[in-house]
Amino acid sequence: MRIINLVLLFCFTASLARGQSDTVKHKYTLFNPVPRDKMKEMETDRPDVTESAYTVEAGHFQVETDLFKQIRVKADGVQSIQTAYNVANYKLGLTEKMDIQLVVPTYVINTTRDVATQNITDKAKGFDDITLRFKYNLWGSGGGNSALAILPFVSLPTSSFASNGVQGGITFPFALAVTEKTSFGAQATISFVKEDNNRYYTNMLYSFTFGHPLFKQLDGFVEGVATYSPYSKTTDTYANGGLIFSANSNLNIDAGLNYGLNKSAGNIYFIGFSFRY
């Protein structure tokens, strides 16, 4: 609770400090969309783990999806593989500072394999839990070199193969323009997860990311992520990287790898896209 209170206090104080300089006048809404000629550069929560501190333009729709994502973890003679198809985040801009998001994992396959024999010991597939998210920009939506947002979320027990119960949490994404071309992002996430003993635990995630253009339409990013689970008493760390190809101002295609730096972390491979309308 001390960490949560400190983060909330920081966000509240920072929001007050920036309140006078934020020039957003809230004239655009869901029913009075931002004109296309006034739309800013598209901001996305993917492909890195670190969420964007910016919201979708008011009155506009955006979809960001992992077309293919695979998580491979090998430990204690067992290999766990989760393969997901079209894990889509559907986003709608409500105001100049707020959007609503619905994350829908269309099809997921969980496979457990014995490493020694390569035999499959368990396999489950189907629709997974849906997550509802809101993002509110505390500052930065009206311009400037930095931005901070608050992103609460709740996962609903809609899985066809697991019983996770209602879970949720809150994320605080931060963005900073280091130079004209180099961007920095960071976040802290507190999530409440139901474990196998039917008790809830407070998991933590911290991340930071750097993005930089490589060529005219190609950007790259590198990222560090650390997660902590009090249930398993483990800290997993990742070194991530990926490429983002901007086909146009409203369409990005990306691919990358999250490389686990410790055995329990595993590796994550993904390819996806983001589209704004």
Image (spheres, rainbow, N blue to C red):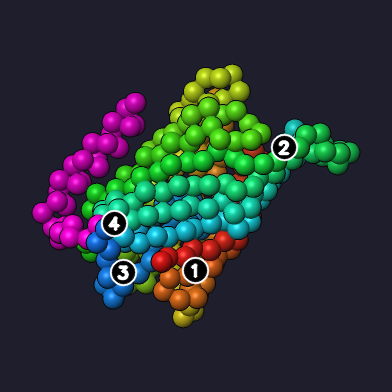
Q: Quick one: which residue is furthest to the right in this view? A: 117
- Residue 245 drawn at (x, y percent): 52, 72
Contact between labelled residues 4 and 2, with CB atoms less than 8 Å apart: no
- Tell me the quarter of the image containing the C terminus: bottom left
Please give the label number shown on residue 124. 2
Secondary element type, mark 1 = strand
Amino acid beneath label 4: Leu
Amino acid beneath label 1: Asn
Q: Quick one: which residue is furthest to the front in this view? A: 31
How crowded pointer 1 is (Cα within 10 Å; few <14, some 14-19, many 20+) is rated as: many
Please give the label number shown on residue 30. 4
The residue at the point 40 percent across, 43 percent down is 133
Q: Which residue is mark 3?
A: 40
Contact between labelled residues 1 and 4, with CB atoms less than 8 Å apart: no
Between residue 246 and residue 220, name the one nearer to us: 246
Decide if residue 211 is in sight here: yes
Between residue 218 and residue 264, name the one nearer to us: 218
- What is the C-alpha distance between the residues marked 4 and 3? 16 Å
- Boundaries of the magenta span: 1-29
Secondary element type, mark 4 = loop
Amino acid beneath label 3: Lys
- What is the C-alpha distance between the residues marked 1 and 2? 32 Å
Q: Which residue is mark 1?
A: 252
The residue at the point 47 percent across, 65 percent down is 275
- What is the C-alpha distance between the residues marked 2 and 4? 39 Å
- What is the C-alpha distance between the residues marked 4 and 1? 23 Å
On screen, residue 174 versus residue 209, left or right, reads left
- Residue 97 drawn at (x, y percent): 26, 53
Amino acid beneath label 2: Ala
